[in-house]
Each structure stands twice: as C-alpha cells, then as structure tokens.
C-alpha cells in the first residue's frame, strides 16, 4: 500500500494543473462556473481513466522491468522534480517527469524497452504539431457553422454549449491519457490494471477538486487571451490530440497540446500567438524535464543504496 | 434550445427594446418642441418639455432595470460589457434630447421662423439617424447580417445632418439681423441638436465593433 502513495501524490498535483489547462480559459473568462467545471471534470476524468486508460498504463508498465520499490521511487522522484521545477518557475509536465524518472532508473537498474521509448518520443513531438493541425482544421470547420447562426443570443448559446461539450470530452481524454503517468509505472507490480486505472483517475479527480481556485486562475490567465470561440477551439483541439494518444497508448502532455492548439489559432486567424520563448519551453519539455527527472531519480536510487 | 436556456437573454433583449421605444418616443417629441417654438406657443412648449423630462426619467429607470438583469449573468462574459456600453450610450442620446428641449424652453432663442424651420429639418434627420440605429441594434438579436446596412444608414443620416448643421451655422453668422449674443445662443442650440445625431453614430460604431468581433 505504501508504494502507491507517491502515485497518488503525483496524480493529485497533475489533476489540478491539467484540469486548469482544459477549463482554465472558460472559467477565468466567466463562461463556466469554477465549481461546475471542477465537478464535471473530476467525474469524466475518472470515467476516462476506467474506460480508456489501460493502453497507456500498459505502455508505461512495460517500458522497464523495474521492481515495485524502484517504480515507486521513480514516481516519487517525478513528483519531486515536478514540484521543485514548479517552485523554480520552470515549465514542468508530469508526463515528461514520469517517463524521465522511469527511464532513468531503468537505465541505472534494469532494462529499457527501446521500441516503447521511441513510440513515446515520436508522440511527444507529435503532440503540439497534432494540436496545431487540429486547431486549424477545427477552427475552419466550426466557424463555418458558427457563421450560419445569425443572432447574438444563439451565437452565445452555441459557444457555451460547445465549450461544455469539449470540456467534458477533454476531461475524459485527460483521464484516459494521463492516468498512465500516475499509476502506469506500477502495472504488473501492484494490483491489476483496472484498479490502477481507478486509483489513477481518482487521484487526478481528487487533485481537481481540492487544489483550489487559484491554480485554475493562474494557469488559465497564463494562456493567451483568446476570444470565447477561439478558446473553445483550443480546448477541443488539445482534447482531440490527447485522446488520440490515449488510443495509441502513449501518455502525452496536455500543456503541450494546449500550446500547440493556441499556435494553430494564431496561424488560422493571422495573429501572432507564439514566440521563441514558447518554442524553447516545448523543446525543454521534450529534453530538459525528462533529463532532470531521470538524473534526480538515478541519484535518489544511488543514494538510498549507499545509505541502506 | 430556448426550452433549456435563454430566458434571461430574451428578457434582457425585450427590456432593451422597451428602452429603445422610450428613447425613440422622446426624440419624436422634439418635433412637438419645435412646433411650439415656431408657433411661439409657450404653454405648449412647457408641457412638451415636461413630457420629455418624464421620458428621460423613464429611460433611466429602464436602463437600470437592464443593468440589474445583467447581473444574472446572461450572455457570454465578453458580450456583457459590449451590451452595457450600448445601453448606456443609447441613454446618453436621450439625455442630449432633453438638453435640446431645455435650451429651447428656458432660453427661447430669438430667431426668425425660416431658421427655426431649418432646425426642424435638422431634427428630422436626427430622428432618422436614431431610427436606423434602433433597427441596427435590433438586428443584432434578429439577423446580424442586416445590422451592418443599418449602421451605414446611421452614418449617412448623420452626414446629411452635418451638412444642414454647417449651412445653418453659416447662415446665422452671415445674418445682419442678429446680435453676436443671439448668434452664439443659436450656434449652441444647433450644435446640441447635431450632438444627438453624433451620439447615434457613436452607438452605431459600437454595433459595428460587436459585429467585427464576431466575424469568425
């Protein structure tokens, strides 16, 4: 039981941040009430984890042949890396920290499945790119239908309804995809896949419900100021991207999907929504975060072996 | 879709239309002010001015009703500000109408009938500009595609009013029959009437911005 605690801690912290990615913009702009957003997100994250989470769980579980204690240590180090990086103001992502930690200890102590690793690497690069493409396509398609709505009150209803639908879909996709980050490392070592999916989903949901308004407002307001329509398209594109990777079975960063979607909106509307700093953040997410998390976990395992 | 939500919105739209009715009624009353002024029927002028003052107060009450209803969070957040801006600025049109009525009632500027009748023409253009504005605003809630045409109409009437205004000012300052004080008094009245049309045009600019924001 003790080994599951780092996973729950990780899920809790992931839940708050990633739900803020999805529901942050509509909550901050007042389109959706904070309380409603968190309750719905929590419910659909758990459903997503239970219905669509197992593929990703198996991918991470089969990535290395680490023992239960080492897997649990990897999760602890990933959570530690995330917390420290957030504290230092560096971009951090649970997905990248967890994979970095598992692979780090895997290299140090066991075997790493290189084909699984390649799949993850390609998916990470594909996440912002996929979100860019989806947001361009979705913007064009949905704006075509939006233009057919000829009164302001109906336009507002159209946007509000779709924002709710994509928020629910996004929560489902988040649960399906990111549960693997929380409990994937424990697959084959503790409980069965379904129970791990449930624990992963519940801890993310717990994070969403308890982390407080401030995180959602901070994350939500950091995402560039978009119109209600564009922000709905952003959530939709990011959710679609994250959902597709949950079907493929690779956990990806929802933050990177959101950033990609915002860039796509910029391209389609002809406004500049990205700069070199954002590109640097994305690349740092691919290389820097897993590297720091990997090195931290190797040092952690090394030190515990020297001491005990 | 209305079954599930939209009652708050429909209610606000209805109240806003009532507000527009009141302001339109007030502007139409200006014709009566000028008729009494031309006929030098001061008793009638006092009565109409009082009516305009009541209309202005009713418009204020209606505006406050809408603003209170807006707290119920109807419409999307970024449209609420736009809508409040529209309502407040329509209300300012009524305020200016009252100012014109009061200038005539209190000061009764000494002018010949010909100039007074030209002012009446100016007032009719003001009324037309407001009527087009009203349709432009209503189109936002009925058919946004039509709204822009009415915005252009407001601009057209404001332009026509501007020409009448300039000609009147020239005529007054060219006049040999009026003292400088009388000329300045007349100038103020003409400019204030023109301001009603200017305010209608300002609101029509806001309508245009709302449309542009939604041009996705």
Image (spheres, coloured by chain):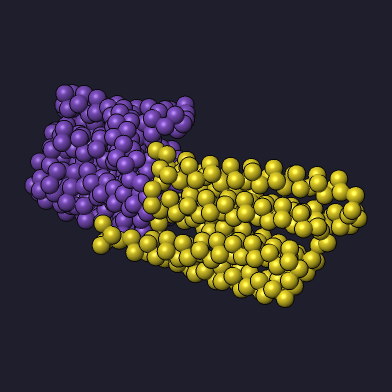
Chain colours: A purple, B yellow
Residue A133: horizontal and vertical position, in percent? Answer: 30, 28
Decide which of A291, A160 is in the foreground and name it: A160
Q: As drawn, is A183 to the left or to the right of B214?
A: left
Residue at 39 percent across and 38 percent down: it is: B216
Decide which of B87, A17 is in the foreground and name it: B87
Q: Quadrant of the C terminus of chain A?
A: top left
Decide which of B214, B199 is in the foreground and name it: B199
Residue at 76 percent across and 68 percent down: it is: B40
**Quadrant of the rendered image containing residue A206:** bottom left
Q: Quadrant of the N terminus of chain A?
A: bottom left
Residue at 37 percent across and 43 percent down: it is: A229
Residue A285: horizontal and vertical position, in percent? Answer: 36, 32
Q: Is residue B152 above or below residue A16?
A: above
Decide which of B34, A301 is in the foreground and name it: B34
Looking at the image, can residue A303 be seen?
no
Residue at 70 percent across and 46 percent down: it is: B164
């Amino acid at each position: 039981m003790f080994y599951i605690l780092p996973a729950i801690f990780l899920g809790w912290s992931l839940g708050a941040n990633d739900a803020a990615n999805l529901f942050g913009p509509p909550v901050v702009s007042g389109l959706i009430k904070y309380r409603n957003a968190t309750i719905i997100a929590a419910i659909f994250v758990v459903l997503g984890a239970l219905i669509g989470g197992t593929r990703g769980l198996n991918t991470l579980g089969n990535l290395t042949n680490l023992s239960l204690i080492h897997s649990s240590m990897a999760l602890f180090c990933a959570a530690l890396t995330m917390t420290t990086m957030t504290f230092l103001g560096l971009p951090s992502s649970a997905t990248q920290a967890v994979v970095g930690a598992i692979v780090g200890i895997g290299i140090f102590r066991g075997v790493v499945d290189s084909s699984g690793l390649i799949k993850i690497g390609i998916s990470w690069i594909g996440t912002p790119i996929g979100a860019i493409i989806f947001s361009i396509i979705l913007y064009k398609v949905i704006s075509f239908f939006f233009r057919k709505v000829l009164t302001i009150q109906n336009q507002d209803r159209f946007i509000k309804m779709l924002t709710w639908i994509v928020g629910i879909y996004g929560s489902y996709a988040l649960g399906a995809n990111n549960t693997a980050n929380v409990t994937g490392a424990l697959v084959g070592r503790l409980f069965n896949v379904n129970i791990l999916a449930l624990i992963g989903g519940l801890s993310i949901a717990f994070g969403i419900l308890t982390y407080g308004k401030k995180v959602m407002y901070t994350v939500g307001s950091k995402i560039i100021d978009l119109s209600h329509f564009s922000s709905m398209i952003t959530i939709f594109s990011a959710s679609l991207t994250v959902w597709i990777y949950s079907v493929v079975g690779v956990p990806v960063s929802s933050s990177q999907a959101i950033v990609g979607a915002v860039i796509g909106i910029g391209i389609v509307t002809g406004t500049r929504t990205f700069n070199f700093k954002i590109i640097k953040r994305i690349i740092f997410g691919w290389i820097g975060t897993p590297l720091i998390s990997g090195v931290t976990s190797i040092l952690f395992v090394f030190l515990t072996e020297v001491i005990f | 879709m209305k079954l599930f939500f939209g009652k708050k919105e429909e209610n606000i739209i209805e109240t806003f239309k009532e507000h527009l009715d009141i302001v339109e009624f007030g502007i139409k009353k200006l014709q009566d002010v000028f008729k009494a002024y031309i006929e030098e029927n001061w008793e009638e002028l006092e009565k109409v001015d009082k009516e305009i003052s009541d209309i202005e107060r009713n418009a204020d009450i209606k505006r406050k009703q809408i603003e209170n209803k807006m707290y119920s969070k109807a419409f999307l957040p970024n449209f609420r500000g736009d809508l409040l801006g529209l309502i407040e600025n329509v209300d300012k049109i009524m305020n200016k109408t009252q100012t014109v009525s009061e200038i005539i009632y209190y000061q009764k500027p000494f002018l010949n009938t010909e100039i007074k009748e030209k002012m009446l023409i100016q007032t009719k253009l003001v009324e037309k500009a407001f009527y087009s504005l009203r349709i432009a605003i209503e189109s936002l809630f009925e058919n946004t595609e039509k709204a822009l045409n009415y915005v252009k109409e407001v601009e057209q009437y404001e332009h026509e009013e501007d020409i009448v205004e300039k000609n009147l000012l020239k005529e007054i300052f060219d006049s040999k029959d009026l003292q400088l004080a009388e000329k300045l008094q007349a100038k103020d009245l003409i400019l204030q009437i023109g301001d009603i049309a200017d305010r209608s045009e300002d609101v029509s600019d806001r309508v245009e911005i709302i449309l542009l924001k939604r041009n996705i």
